[in-house]
Image (cartoon, grey):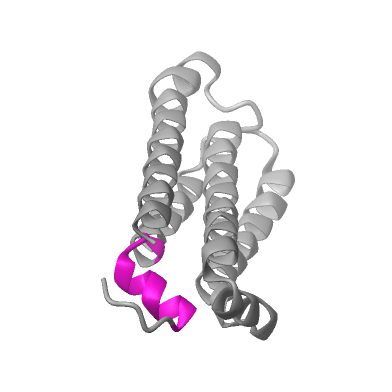
Amino acid sequence: MKDIIKTLRTIFWIDIVLSLLIFGVVEFVLLDLTGGMLVGHVQLEFLWQSFSILLTLGGIYGALRMFKLKSIETRIVAYPSICYPTWSIWRLIVLTFVLDNNIMSYWLFANGSFAWLATIVLLTFPFIYPTEERFLYETKSKETV
C-alpha cells in the first residue's frame, strides 16, 4: 500500500509542477511574443469560454465523484492494489486535461477568465491528494496505516 501511495504522490507532484511550468511559460514568454493569437475573435471566444466553463465544472465534478460510481467502486473494493492506482491516475488525468485546456485557452485568447478557471481547477487538486487515509477510505479496506 505504501508503495502505491508513494508512486501516486510522485505522479501527482510531477503533474502539478509540469502544469505550473506550462502556465509560467505561457504567462511570461508566449503572451509577450504573440499577445494572444485569437484576441479579436469575439464570437469564437464566447463559445470557447462557455465550453471551457462547462468542461471545468463537469471535469471537477466528475473527478471528485468518480469513485462513487458503482462500477468503479466495486472494482476498487474488489482489487484495490490494481484498480485504485489506475483510477486515481485517471482522476488526475481528467483534472490535468481541464487545467491544461484552460491554460492553453488563456494563451490563445489572452482572457483572464481562463486563468481563473485554471486557478479553480488547481484548488481542487488537494481534494485528490493521495494519502493512506484516502486509500483506506476509498477502498473500504480494514488495514491499519
The part of the chain drawn in magenta is: 128-140
Residue 42's image quarter?
top right
The answer to whether 88 is drawn above or below residue 27 in the figure is below
**Is residue 46 shown left or right of residue 84?**
right
Q: Nearer the viewer, residue 109 or 84?
A: 84
Provide residue 122's location: percent of width, then percent of height.
Answer: 39, 53
Q: Nearer the viewer, residue 34 or 43?
A: 34
Question: Per the image, is 131 magenta?
Answer: yes
Provide residue 52's location: percent of width, then percent of height.
Answer: 62, 55
**Is residue 107 shown left or right of residue 2?**
right
Question: Per the image, is 8 magenta?
Answer: no
Q: Which residue of the protein is positioned furthest toward the top in this rendering?
A: 33
The answer to whether 143 is drawn above or below residue 55 in the figure is below
Provide residue 90's location: percent of width, then percent of height.
Answer: 60, 57
- The residue at 66%/31% (across/down) is 38
- The residue at 45%/77% (across/down) is 138
Provide residue 32's location: percent of width, then percent of height.
Answer: 45, 18
**Is residue 69 shown left or right of residue 88?**
right
